[in-house]
Amino acid sequence: MTRRDWLHSTTLFVCAPCACLAGVSRDCCTLPEAPSGAVQFEPGLVVIDLSRTPDLNRTGDALKIVDSARKLQILVARPAKNRFVALDQKCTHGGGALTYVHRHRHLYCTCWGHAKFALDGAVLRWPNSEQPRPLRAHTVEKRGNRLYVRVENPA
């Protein structure tokens, strides 16, 4: 590695909020979107067919469901073998996208400042002196090979 390459990578890493935004890793800030046909919308419910969502097959997996028409942007994660959580994927601090980092069992904002949230939506880190606002968590029920996510109160 040349001195120039080293300085470039160091500058990116120091100036970016995390390794993935610095181009060092792609594991942190990117979430796959649920495949088309794997999600159905019913009044007050989002139904996810687990047989059509390989991004939720293993513990630690996560994906996002985005439906602009319904104003939905939800993150669904599998923090344990038989446990699924669903939360709004939009940060309450600055509106940035959130991602799930299984190693820490938290959700992180992908924008500068990195607000951090627990899997129940509670604020764990808030980047400034404003009043912290928790994320809206959605009830998830697994029946057979389907997840039912309740979304009665869209944001």
Image: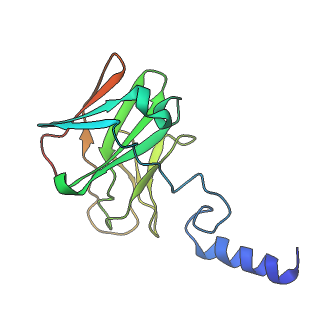
Residue 38 position by quadrant? top left
- The quarter in which the C terminus is drawn is bottom left
- Please tell me which residue lies in front, 128 or 154: 154
Q: Is residue 142 left or right of residue 8?
A: left
The image shows residue 7, relative to residue 20, as above or below, that is below
Residue drawn at x 43%, y 43% is 63
The reply, left or right, for residue 66 in relation to residue 44 is right
Q: x%, y% of residue 120? A: 33, 39
Task: Depth check: give the residue in front, 113 or 61.
Answer: 61
Quadrant showing the N terminus: bottom right
* Image quadrant assignment for residue 141: top left
What colouring method underlies this structural image? Answer: rainbow
The x, y position of residue 95, in whole percent, is 31, 65
Residue 128 place in picture, x, y as percent: 37, 69
The residue drawn where x is 23% and y is 57% is 68
Q: Please indicate whether residue 60 sits to the left or right of residue 7 in the image.
A: left
Camera sees residue 121: no
Asked if residue 83 shows in the view, the reply is: yes
Q: How many marks?
A: 0
